[in-house]
Amino acid sequence: MIRVSIIGISGYVGIELFRILKQHKNLEIVNIYSESNKNETIGKLYPQFSHINMKCVDKTSEDIVKESDVIFTAVPHGGASIPYTLFAKKYNKKIIDLSAEFRLKDPAIYEEWYGNKIEDKELLKEAVYGLPELHKDEIKNGWLIANPGCYTTASILANAPLVKNRIIDLDSIIIDAKSGASGAGKKPKADLLFSELDESFYPYSVTTHRHTPEIEQELTNLAEKKIEITFTPHLVPMVRGIIATSYSKLKDNITEEKLYTLYRDFYKEASFVRVIDNIPNTKWVATSNFIDIAIRIDKRTNRVIVISALDNLIKGASGQAVQNMNIMFGEKEDEALTMLGVYP
């Protein structure tokens, strides 16, 4: 049995990790931890789990790591995951970090976009970017996984086949994305109040969203050429879900049929990528680990439009983290992740 600890259980991503991992056949959750809720029962934090007799532990990060085979750190960026990572390295354990701490390979870019410094650059070198569809072999052999962000997963997977095969003008990528409010986390914020968010729809972090360099990094690796994108996120008055619409200029004439063949071949081994004919809808992927992708060509402007949809808390965070864990430990990739979407 794999011994698992979850750090940051009180957040939306942490509790989704708990829910998913409780369905896993080959693991035991040995520790759940919340800095602000030590010794509180999981049922008090989340009444839907009141039948589970488990408390948030009051232990040191070292003790938690020593008792675990793998640690999930569902914490904010800024250093909260670092102690667990250092102890994981010391005791030869595995860690899946859901913060942004290790996603960007260039420390200068991380500092520019996040305002924090990476003190231990050796850890950064050892981190594997945890997007299974692109880095499965590295994940399998890694010990420190930088779990991708939600917007980034939707955006990278939508554009990867086009970029890899250089079918588009690589300087023309524009990504227009929308997210439900859970993507902003659980901490109370004025703009997330019901009276502010309901019947409202607006862009935010225009030209400055921190997922931008993450998307650029992975697309640059695929293209073997520096890529810069225009990325604009929006907040939608719904709880969960992301839909991203990507636009780019085609280099040559190509049919939608050929693009669909290209995408389905590119993702033929990807358990959770569904290349579909219909335009994706966030409801179709809600509470699942799937990402749906559809393609259209605007013949008038010679642009390709790729639409992708996923659940930001599952494929965009906790589900992807469990997918990474399964790969690391040689489990079936879809273990505990076979849940289908809920509709309506």
Image (tube, grey):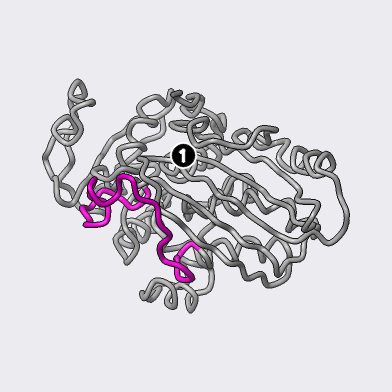
Q: Main secondary structure of the magenta part?
A: loop
Q: Quadrant of residue 23?
A: top left
Residue 276 or 318: which is nearer the viewer? Answer: 276
Residue 18 or 141: which is nearer the viewer? Answer: 18
Secondary structure of the residue carrying tag 1 is loop
Crowding at mark 1 (Cα within 10 Å: few <14, some 14-19, many 20+): many
Most distant residue in the right direction: 253
Which residue lies at the image location 63% right of the left edge and 45% below the top edge? 133
**Which corner quadrant holds the C terminus?**
top left
Q: Say above or below: 52 vs 238.
A: above
- Judging by the rendered image, the residue that carries numbered circle 1 is 311
Residue 92 pos. (x, y %):
42, 52
Residue 80 pos. (x, y %):
29, 61
Q: Which range is magenta?
A: 183-211
- Asked whether residue 194 is drawn in magenta, I would say yes
Q: Say above or below: 332 vs 11.
A: above
Residue 36 appears left or right of 25:
left
Residue 60 pos. (x, y %):
20, 53
Which residue lies at the image location 40% right of the left edge and 47% below the top edge? 236
Q: Say above or below: 212 vs 52.
A: below
Residue 121 or 268: which is nearer the viewer? Answer: 268
- Asked whether residue 214 is drawn in magenta, I would say no
Q: Quadrant of residue 327?
A: top right
Q: Quadrant of residue 277?
A: top right
Which residue lies at the image location 73% right of the left edge and 36% below the top edge? 268
Which residue lies at the image location 66% right of the left edge and 48% below the top edge? 306
Q: Say above or below: 183 vs 40.
A: below
Residue 61 appears left or right of 82:
left
**Which corner quadrant holds the N terminus?**
top left
- Tally the numbered discs: 1
- The type of residue carrying mark 1 is Asp
